[in-house]
Each structure stands twice: as structure tokens, then as C-alpha cells.
Image: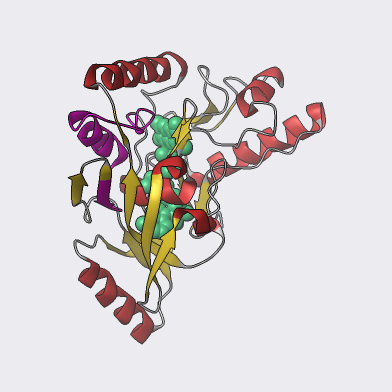
């Protein structure tokens, strides 16, 4: 799985399937049901810590396969496998505002919907009109945005619902292309200045606690640069853990726990991971 996560960490999946059509997914669900195999759905693996022993059963990777899109006026219909930077580029080309935050986030649309990805005061949930998903029995479910409880890095899809996000309808706003481009460039430059983009990471490791920043607390606790094996608290941004080369999931998990204990002891604040733990050895 290290080839399918941006942390470049994770043991083998028994079976990894990248579906190209909704029919492929229905076939996988049928096969999994017939053989009693568990299913793990992933997007582009940019918010995942996969255990060193990997993932049993079928891993369904939605990113990369289901990528079609259609733009009609200010409305964008896109399948869940399309990557956010690509979607942002399409919106820019169509003169549509709302995805200025998205370049630089290596997420699939599906994963970004599950996480309600956001940055720089924007979040995906704000522009969602409708999401279509499949349950593991193969039934289609359609959700109006108001049904999905989008909040800071949260949506109803995270509540153990066992749903596969297939596609979404987004409503953007017409705007001058030069202004959209300028905002995207400002956002990307800020990322380059503040984030360790030359190392494998999973973005922010912890959610920001109410009224504060996880990165500030970790830095104040003196942990910038602290390492366990090849897993290191970034020197550039303390809420990122970088893989210096051959970090294992166990080392990253040990570092996550160490940071949590230290910040709890120093400041009485419980840091909650934003990254999702998947597979054997971490979950
Ligand atoms: C360099 C870098 C920068 C980042 N910057 C940001 C940022 O600015 N803002 C931000 O919010 N995040 C950021 N992230 C984190 C990450 O990109 C987001 O959390 C993103 O939403 C994860 O999308 P993904 O497709 O990679 O999902 P994954 O990491 O593969 O999965 C995340 C969760 O969603 C579930 N999931 C994924 N796809 C589906 C689907 N189709 N159906 C059902 N469930 C699914 C998975 O089971 C898992 O629980 C960054 C990460 C990196 C590496």
C-alpha cells in the first residue's frame, strides 16, 4: 500500500481494485458478498496511515478510475475518482470560483467529500449540492448537502456508514479567471513557504483544537524535528509528520502517540488525529 499512500507507508493489500465504472464497483460488491470478504474504500491515500501488515480483503481504490466530469453553467458534475487539483484546473478554465483552495491538495473528490477538505477559509462542503453513493449491498443513495452535516474536516460519511461515494454535483460561481488564478497562486505559494512539500506526508496529522492550532502546540512542546526512526515531526510545520525515507506505520503511530502524550501533559489539550488509520497494525 506504500504505492497508494502519500506517506509512502503501508503493507500489502490482499486485493486492490481500481474500478473504472460504477458497474465495476457493483461487481466487486457482489464478489465480496459472495466470498464474505471485507471491503476497505480508499481515495488517493493522502489522509491515510495504513498498517505495516496491510489490509485484508478487498481494497477499493476510487481515485484514478472514476474520473469523468461535466460542466454546465455554474454547475459541475464529477465522479469521485477525479483529483482535486485537476477539478480546480477545470473550474479555473471555465471561469468558476469556489475551488481556489484545492490546488495542492492531493485528494480524490470522494476522499475530499468524506473529509470535507478545505483550506484558506474555503471548504468543499460549502459548494456541494448533491452526492451519490452506493451502500455495500449495491443500493444507490442520493444525499442533498444539508443531509451530510459538513463541518470542520467532518461529514456524515465518516460515521461508519459503509458507503462508497460515487459522484457529486458542485455549484460554483462565475468569476474573472485572472482573479481565480491569482488566488490559487497565492494559496500555492503559501503552501510552499509553510509546508514540507518535498517529503512524503499525509498533510496535517491532527485536527486543530477549538480556538488553537495543533502545529503551535506541538512546536511549543519542543517537538519540531523530533523523530522516531524515519518518522519525524517536520522542521517546517509541526503538524506534519514527514517520512524521511523508510518510516514504518508503527514508527508514525508511535510518534503520533508520543506527541499526544506530550501535548496533553504540557497544555492539557487532547489532540485528535485527522488522518485515518486503516488495516492491520494500526486500526
Ligand atoms: C501535501 C498534502 C496537503 C494537504 N492539504 C490539505 C488541506 O489543505 N486541506 C485538507 O482538508 N486536507 C489536506 N490534506 C489531506 C488530504 O488530502 C485530505 O484529507 C483528502 O480529503 C483525502 O482525500 P483522499 O482521496 O486522499 O482520501 P483517502 O486518504 O484515501 O481517504 C480518506 C478517508 O475517506 C474515505 N474515502 C475516500 N474515498 C472514498 C469514497 N469514494 N467513498 C467512501 N469513502 C472514501 C477513506 O475510507 C478514508 O476514511 C493534505 C494532504 C497532503 C499529503
- Near-viewer residue (196 or 249): 196
Q: Is residue 279 magenta?
A: no
| Vertical position of residue 164 compared to residue 135: above or below | above
Number of numbered callouts drawn: 0
What is the x, y in percent for residue 274?
56, 42
Residue displayed at 68% across by 34% down: 209
Left or right: residue 208 versus residue 244 is right
For the record, the magenta segment spans: 76-103
Work out which quarter of the rendered image holds the C terminus and state it: bottom right
Left or right: residue 96 versus residue 35 is left
What is the x, y in percent for residue 152?
57, 40
Q: Is residue 54 visible?
A: no
| Vertical position of residue 201 compared to residue 107: above or below | above
Rendered image coloring scheme: secondary structure
Quadrant observed for ligand 1 in the rendered image: top left
- Near-viewer residue (40 or 158): 158
What is the x, y in percent for residue 185?
31, 17
Q: Is residue 91 magenta?
A: yes
Left or right: residue 233 versus residue 210 is left
Residue extending farthest to the bottom is 34
Q: Is residue 124 visible?
A: yes
- Near-viewer residue (176 or 91): 176
| Vertical position of residue 27 compared to residue 127: above or below | below
Left or right: residue 104 versus residue 158 is left
Residue displayed at 55% across by 64% down: 160
Residue displayed at 33% across by 76% down: 29
What is the x, y in percent for residue 64?
23, 50
Residue displayed at 44% across by 58% down: 144
Amino acid at each position: 500500500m506504500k504505492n497508494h499512500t502519500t506517506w509512502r507507508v503501508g503493507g500489502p493489500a490482499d486485493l486492490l481494485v481500481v474500478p473504472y465504472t460504477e458497474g465495476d464497483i457493483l461487481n466487486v460488491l457482489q464478489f465480496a458478498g459472495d466470498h464474505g470478504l471485507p471491503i476497505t474504500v480508499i481515495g488517493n491515500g493522502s489522509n491515510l496511515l495504513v498498517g505495516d501488515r496491510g489490509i485484508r480483503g478487498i481494497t477499493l481504490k476510487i481515485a484514478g478510475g472514476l474520473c469523468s466530469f461535466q460542466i454546465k453553467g455554474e454547475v459541475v458534475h464529477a465522479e469521485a475518482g477525479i483529483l482535486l487539483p485537476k477539478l480546480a484546473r477545470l473550474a479555473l478554465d471555465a471561469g468558476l470560483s469556489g475551488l481556489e483552495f484545492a490546488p495542492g491538495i492531493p485528494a480524490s473528490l470522494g476522499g475530499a467529500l468524506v473529509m470535507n477538505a478545505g483550506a484558506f477559509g474555503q471548504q468543499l462542503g460549502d459548494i456541494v449540492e448533491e452526492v451519490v453513493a452506493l451502500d455495500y449491498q449495491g443500493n444507490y443513495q442520493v444525499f442533498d448537502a444539508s443531509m451530510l452535516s459538513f463541518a470542520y474536516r467532518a461529514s456524515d460519511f465518516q460515521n461508519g456508514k459503509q458507503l462508497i461515494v460515487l459522484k457529486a454535483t458542485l455549484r460554483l460561481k462565475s468569476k474573472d479567471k485572472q482573479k481565480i488564478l491569482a488566488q490559487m497562486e497565492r494559496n500555492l505559494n503559501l503552501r510552499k513557504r509553510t509546508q514540507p512539500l518535498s517529503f512524503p506526508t499525509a498533510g496535517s496529522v491532527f485536527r486543530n483544537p477549538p480556538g488553537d492550532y495543533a502545529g503551535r502546540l506541538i512546536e511549543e512542546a519542543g517537538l519540531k524535528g523530533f523523530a522516531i526512526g524515519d518518522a519525524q515531526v517536520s522542521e517546517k510545520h509541526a503538524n506534519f509528520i514527514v517520512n524521511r525515507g523508510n518510516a514504518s506505520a508503527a514508527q508514525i503511530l508511535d510518534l503520533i502517540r508520543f506527541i499526544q502524550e506530550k501535548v496533553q501533559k504540557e497544555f492539557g489539550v487532547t489532540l485528535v488525529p485527522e488522518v485515518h488509520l486503516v488495516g492491520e497494525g494500526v486500526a
